[in-house]
Image: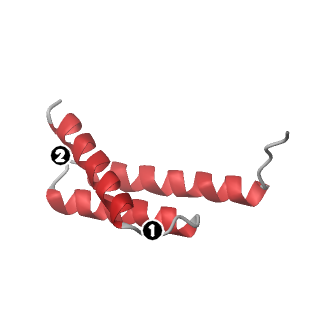
Amino acid sequence: MSTSSSPTSSTSGQDNIDELWRAIERENSGGMLHPSSTDELLRAMKDAMERNGVPDSGAKSLVLAFIINVYARLFNDL
């Protein structure tokens, strides 16, 4: 059983990850994530997932919002 992925999907996935890290670094440059920053990160993650074919759903939005808010709380408390 072989599980190979096409180079374009791998590259696209890496591009999405790079884009998300740039958004996180840009929004966290002052050392604090503000509510508007978490909203922008949520939009960036949803956009990246949709480009990879993940359909938009309430569950996806809830999970992403939870992850981003946990990230914001962890790094704001450092």
Residue type, mark 1 in image: Asp
In this view, the mark in front (2 or 1): 1
Tell me what residue is drawn at x 77 percent, y 51 percent: 5
List x then y, in percent, for residue 14: 60, 51
List x then y, in percent, for residue 70: 24, 41
Residue type, mark 2 in image: Met
What whole-number distance in Å separates the C-alpha atoms at marks 2 and 1? 23 Å
Q: Quadrant of the C terminus?
A: top left
List x then y, in percent, for residue 69: 22, 48
Answer with left or right where residue 25 lies relative to residue 35: right
Q: Quadrant of the N terminus?
A: top right
**Secondary structure under the numbered disc 2 in the rendered image:** loop
Tell me what residue is drawn at x 64 percent, y 59 percent: 12
Tell me what residue is drawn at x 61 percent, y 54 percent: 13
Q: Residues within 10 Å of mark 1 (few under 14, many from 20)?
A: some
Task: Report the disc number at residue 32.
Answer: 2
- Examine the rendered structure and indicate whether residue 57 appears above or below residue 21: below
- Examine the rendered structure and indicate whether residue 71 appears above or below residue 41: above
Q: Nearer the viewer, residue 57 or 11?
A: 57
- Examine the rendered structure and indicate whether residue 66 appears above or below residue 39: above
